Amino acid sequence: MANIKSAKKRVLIAEANRQRNAAFKTSIKTALKKALALAEGDDKERAFFKAVLNAAISKAYQLCDKAVSKGILHKNTAARKKSRLVLAIKKLAK
């Protein structure tokens, strides 16, 4: 454990940042899972379904891009997540 006051503060700040980043990463995983779940479902109203699916994909993209800008995710990691999401949705559409 740190003895210097500023080092003790940094430990507290680092822990708060770690929890915030973990929560943000969890929200990204949830958004990706929601988009995949929507793609798996067979909704009767196709126009409404496409709008909802596009909104879910857009939200997942937005969260990934925001994580990159905040330094939570590496840009290649976010690109990989987005690519895998779209590939999975296209695979389900066939």
Image (tube, rainbow, N blue to C red):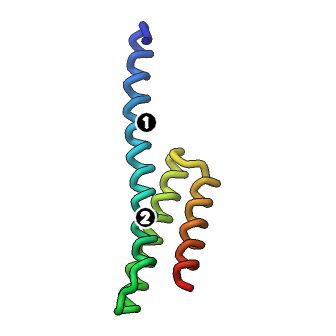
Height in image: 88 above or below 13? below
Quarter of the image that includes the N terminus: top left
The residue under the point 45% across, 50% down is 25
Label 1 amino acid? Arg
The residue under the point 59% across, 66% down is 84
Label 2 amino acid? Lys
Height in image: 16 above or below 10? below
Between the C-alphas of marks 1 and 2, the distance is 23 Å
**Left or right of 24 on screen, residue 87:** right
Height in image: 78 above or below 56? above
Q: Which residue is mark 2?
A: 33
Image coordinates for residue 43, horizontal then vertical, percent = 36, 87
Q: Looking at the image, is mark 1 or mark 2 nearer the viewer?
A: 2
The residue under the point 40% across, 59% down is 30
Disc 2, SS: helix
- Total labels: the figure holds 2
Mark 2 closeness class: few <14, some 14–19, many ≥20 residues within 10 Å? some
Q: Nearer the viewer, residue 23 or 44?
A: 44
Quarter of the image that includes the C terminus: bottom right
The disc, 1 or 2, on the residue closer to the chain's N-terminal end is 1
Image coordinates for residue 92, horizontal then vertical, percent = 53, 79
Disc 1, SS: helix
Image coordinates for residue 89, horizontal then vertical, percent = 53, 76
**Left or right of 69 on screen, residue 35:** left
Q: Which residue is mark 1?
A: 18
